[in-house]
Amino acid sequence: DSVVVRMIPDNRLPPRHLHAVRTGKTFAVIKWESPYDSPDQDMLYAVAVKDLVRKTDKIYKVKSRNSTVEYTIKKLEPGGKYHVIVQLGNMSKESSMKINTVPLSAPDALKIITENDHILLFWKSLALKESNFNESRGYEIHMFDSLMNITAYLGNTTENFFKVSNLKMGHNYSFSVQARCLYGGQMCGEPATLLYDELGTGKDPSAAKSGQATDVAAIVVPVLFLLLVTLGIGFVVLYMRHRRLQSSFTAFANSHYSSRLGSAIFSSGDDLGDEDDEAPMITGFSDDVPMVIA
């Protein structure tokens, strides 16, 4: 035996399984289920968004007949904290949850340049990759001294560099730069952190000081390469001249070599230009040939 029982819908029940599907910098996608399965009519929901930082409230109305409802809350702020309440429009029991939006990214290319009595922090503008960031908001800089185990707030700036002075010899520091925090330090950007290891020398031997090291390497390496190329070309030229001189001397010596005498014959230079250069050389007289003197 069986019996079919149909439950009477109760509009005083709260929405079920409220949760966040995806959270970004300026939006959040939330999802919930109706108070009971298979609604037979449109249901009106009230979505209240409370900004826990700014202490403001916004209410949105959502109408749906689906058992599962998905809704996107827009115009949120990066790094914000929100309390979301969903209930039926007749102010029935509510379901609630908390949402933290994604903070602004950390500045890129943070580096340190060491000067005589201070250091300079440099970084790329955050507005290059964050459309929600305005340079007028600025950045704030923090420093951590590992030897003293203390963190100090150095200040803020709207520029892309910051000067740090009065560093102690032999101390190791970590510097962080982030989008300036708003409303009592509750809405901050992600920090970019860099280690400065002084090691008692007043200079930074780590990769963080790549500003000067990179610049010097960029100059020295091409100069050394040009010097090596120049030396190589010089050696080749000298070698070719030596081979050419050696070949010329060998050819000259072979052209004046006498196989009968076994040596090379060179003229003194006084005979140059004489008309009898091609006359045969008299090498001697034979005993059986009479000499006639006129």
Image (cartoon, helix red, strand yellow):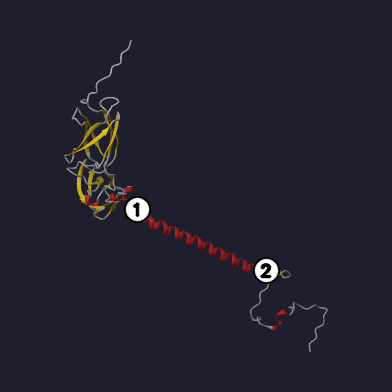
Q: Which residue position is annotated with label 2?
A: 254
Q: Residues within 10 Å of mark 1 (few under 14, many from 20)?
A: some
Reading the chain from its start, which is encountered first: label 1 or label 2? 1
Q: Position of residue 214 (x, y in %)?
A: 36, 53
**Mark 1 element type:** helix
Q: Is residue 210 left or right of residue 251?
A: left
Q: Position of residue 191 (x, y in %)?
A: 26, 44
Q: Is the Cβ of the residue at disc 1 closer than 8 Å to that at disc 2? A: no
Q: Residue at x 33, y 48 (%)?
A: 207
Identify which amino acid the numbered label 2 is placed on.
Answer: Asn
Identify the residue at the far bottom of this view: 294
Q: Residues within 10 Å of mark 2 (few under 14, many from 20)?
A: few
When asked about the image quadrant of residue 218, the answer is bottom left
**Mark 2 element type:** helix
Q: Which residue position is annotated with label 1?
A: 213
Q: Which quadrant, please, contains the C terminus?
A: bottom right
- For the residue pair 68 and 31, the one nearer the viewer reads as 68
- For the residue pair 87 and 286, the one nearer the viewer reads as 87
When asked about the image quadrant of residue 265, the answer is bottom right
Identify which amino acid the numbered label 1 is placed on.
Answer: Ala
- For the residue pair 99 and 271, the one nearer the viewer reads as 99
